[in-house]
Amino acid sequence: MVLDVGSGGNPFPRSDVLLDRLTGDDHRCGEAMMIDRACVFGDAASMPFKDNAFDFVIASHILEHMPEPEVFIKELQRVGKAGYIETPNALMERFHPYNIHCLELLNINGILHINKKAKPVIDQYLGTKNLLGEKSEFGQIMFKHPKLFHIEYLWDKSIEYKIHNSEVSCDWIEEINDMNIQGEHKESFTDDIVQGAGWREYGMLFVNAWHSYKRKKRLKNFDLISILACPSCHADLEKNNNKLHCNSCNKTFSYEGEIPNFN
């Protein structure tokens, strides 16, 4: 069972369950959110899943958005047995900062080193020169050698990390998050195929179609509620009409249609 956290508009084909906070398209490179499989709306810092619900958790380009990285990392380890983390690294963030990113990261000898950003652009000199533009020399290097500017981190059982400036607050990110409207949805990867699409787009369409077929067979008797838990206390939930109720802390959440909403 594979979870894709912050799945957005282009989730990994092999993932079985999608979790997204349903913020605006700014957090998805302008793409509408994909809801073509089991999907949950909720906060990645307090995931609505039972302990060890997943064998593998994919967290691609989401950690850098988390103002309290230790909380998110703890949640990854709670709901998953192993996983994969991908983010821009600190070098890319200095050369091309994003105002929706609140962390700078490095992977040194299997340890994630985390630097919290006190503001959207830390380096006012390097960070304002568009050094990674497509026509720039640094930009050409990045497109040819993306691993020089990104972190790929596989973990099993535990995530090794160190926060170097835990005293810094990233609360400024919440004001930016609040300005993001809710994004649109799409229910099929065919929605991405446009006139003039190339071999890569059609290749990905085939890959996604294959995994969709395998997923339907593999999860034929899967019940999403069986892995859901209260995001506050992690207790079991009861479904009643269009609501999910926690008998432990007495909280109620919406479950209209096929997508539970914990926002």
Image: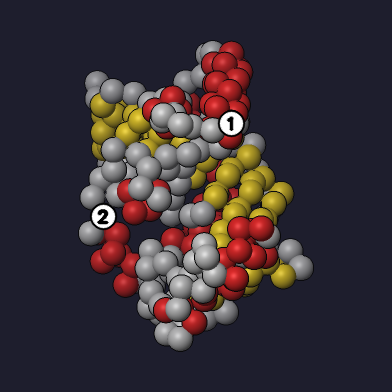
Is 152 above or below relative to 108? above
Q: Amino acid at mark 1?
A: Trp
**Mark 2 element type:** loop
Q: Is residue 43 left or right of residue 226?
A: left
Residue 173: x, y in percent?
A: 34, 67
Frontmost residue, 45 versus 66: 66
Specify the quadrant that holds the C terminus.
top left
Other-residue count near label 2 (Cα within 10 Å), few / some / many at <14 / 14–19 / ≥20: some
Q: Which residue is mark 2?
A: 180
Picture disc at residue 83: none
Disc nearest the viewer among 1 and 2: 1
Residue 193: x, y in percent?
A: 44, 29
Q: Amino acid at mark 2?
A: Asn
Frontmost residue, 216 versus 247: 216
**Mark 1 element type:** helix
Residue 257: x, y in percent?
A: 28, 23
State which tag comes first along the sequence, 1 or 2. Answer: 2
Picture disc at residue 199: 1
Residue lying at 29% horizontally and 43% vertically, measured from the top left: 183
Q: Residue furthest bottom?
A: 125
Is 59 above or below relative to 166? above
Is 258 above or below relative to 62? above
Residue 23: x, y in percent?
A: 31, 49
Residue lying at 74% horizontally and 64% vertically, measured from the top left: 110
Other-residue count near label 1 (Cα within 10 Å), few / some / many at <14 / 14–19 / ≥20: few
Residue lying at 25% horizontally and 45% vertically, measured from the top left: 182
Frontmost residue, 156 versus 178: 178
Quadrant housing residue 80: top right
